[in-house]
Image (cartoon, rainbow, N blue to C red):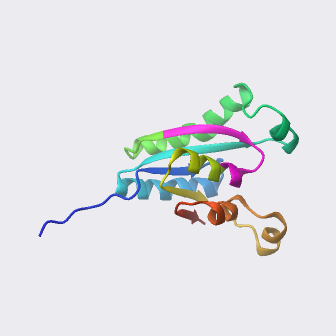
Amino acid sequence: MMSTIYNIMKKILVPIDGSANSKRGLSKALEIAKKQEASIFALHIVVMSSSIAIGGARRPPKNEAEKKISKNIIAPAKKKCEQNGISFEFKIVYGADPGYDVVKFANKHGFEMIVMGARGLNSLKKIFLGSASDYVLKKAKIPVLIVK
């Protein structure tokens, strides 16, 4: 009897912000990517005020802040993926709502899974503030893994 291995996931989206939680999300995504022979796509969302996001340009020109993001957040993630032999791409997106932006990006670009860190807000704060990971978990049309 011949056995066939089916790789379910080829493209994993990992929102990153440089926090310890997002680094844990990236580490878990690396574990999955190795087993599935998948690639990792890191997404960093720069949160703008809602007035700029609604009426202004969606993507300001590249500036010093974006260079700092690439150096301090993207470069370490890329290095970690390269050290593990995993294909890595990234995008910096400007928006007002990280959860919404993650789901929109995932849907538009055909990812098979989202792996992201949880902020670990307590229950009372979640009721009033919500969280990006809660939003993604509820609204994404693909599997979502929240890493604590």
**Residue 43 in picture, x, y percent from top left:** 60, 44
Tell which residue pokes out farthest to the bottom in this image.
Answer: 123
Q: Position of residue 93 (x, y in %)?
A: 67, 39
Residue 99 among magenta residues = yes
- Asked if residue 138 is among those painted magenta in the image, a careful observer would answer no
Q: Is residue 6 left or right of residue 82?
A: left
Give the magenta-colored segment's residue range.
Answer: 89-101
Residue 31 position (above or below residue 58): below
Image quarter of residue 91: top right
Query: How many discs appear?
Result: 0
Which quadrant: the C terminus?
A: bottom right
| Residue with the most extreme right position | 51
Residue found at x 40% / y 45%:
86
Question: Is residue 52 or residue 32 the one in the foreground?
Answer: 52
Corner quadrant of residue 51? top right
- The location of residue 120, given as percent across then percent down, is 70, 66
Q: Residue at coordinates 68% horizontally, 65% vertically from top-left?
A: 134
Q: Nearer the viewer, residue 123 or 103?
A: 103
Q: Residue at x 48, y 51 (%)?
A: 12
- Location of the N terminus (image quadrant): bottom left
Residue at 80 percent across and 41 percent down: it is: 48
Q: Quick check: 123 above or below 56? A: below
From this viewpoint, which residue is outermost toward the left?
1
